[in-house]
């Protein structure tokens, strides 16, 4: 699938078929994520792969009871290594760059999932401390995104987009 096609075809999928996602496919998703750009090429991302039903259930509870998370065969939690980013860029690295970098990695996962015929959803609404406890995430590592992934059991229509003339500014705002 051509990249622009994947960009336009990607949707937030919240319903999944009862079909496994092979480990090789998960590895392709992580491989795509690790090729995301990062400030100073620090690559401050960490990825936690979850297949265990009980852990997915606890993650769904931590994510404001978004139960579709536990229905996905695999969930990837993308984390930002704040310490790694701070070594190169101090406070700005720890508070901004590592978030930007993991957002780029997350987008690569979503687009690759789409290109592979999978569905995924970028979940950012969650109790960070609960997720940290469920996954035993150490201090200095921040959970940024929960991504349930599977074979889509729904096909949402495209959502409206603001027109270019409302969002593009030349030279000044």
Image: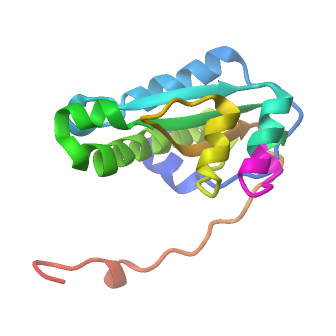
- Residue 118, given in percent of the width and then of the height, sits at 68, 37
Determine whether 81 is above or below 67 in the image. above
- Residue 9, given in percent of the width and then of the height, sits at 58, 53
Looking at the image, can residue 72 be seen? Answer: no
Q: Residue furthest left?
A: 171
Front one among 123 and 87: 87
Looking at the image, can residue 42 be seen? Answer: yes
Q: Residue furthest right?
A: 18
Residues in magenta? 60-69
Quarter occupied by the C terminus: bottom left
- Residue 38, given in percent of the width and then of the height, sits at 28, 37
Determine whether 140 is above or below 124 in the image. above
Front one among 125 and 91: 91
Front one among 26 and 156: 26
Determine whether 51 is above or below 58 in the image. above
Which image quadrant is residue 64 in? bottom right
Determine whether 78 is above or below 156 in the image. above
Front one among 57 and 108: 57
């Amino acid at each position: 699938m051509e990249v622009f096609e994947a960009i336009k075809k990607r949707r937030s999928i919240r319903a999944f078929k009862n079909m496994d996602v092979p480990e090789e496919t998960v590895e392709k998703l992580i491989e795509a994520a690790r090729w995301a750009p990062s400030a100073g090429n620090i690559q401050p991302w960490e990825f936690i792969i979850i297949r265990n039903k009980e852990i997915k259930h606890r993650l769904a509870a931590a994510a404001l009871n978004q139960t579709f998370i536990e229905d996905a065969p695999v969930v990837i939690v993308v984390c930002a290594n704040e310490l790694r980013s701070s070594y190169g860029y101090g406070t700005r690295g720890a508070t901004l760059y590592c978030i930007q970098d993991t957002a780029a990695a997350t987008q690569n996962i979503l687009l690759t999932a789409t290109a592979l015929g999978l569905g995924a959803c970028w979940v950012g609404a969650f109790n960070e401390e609960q997720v940290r406890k469920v996954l035993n995430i150490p201090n200095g590592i921040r959970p940024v995104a929960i991504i349930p992934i599977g074979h889509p059991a729904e096909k949402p229509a495209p959502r409206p987009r603001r027109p270019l003339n409302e969002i593009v500014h030349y030279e000044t705002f």
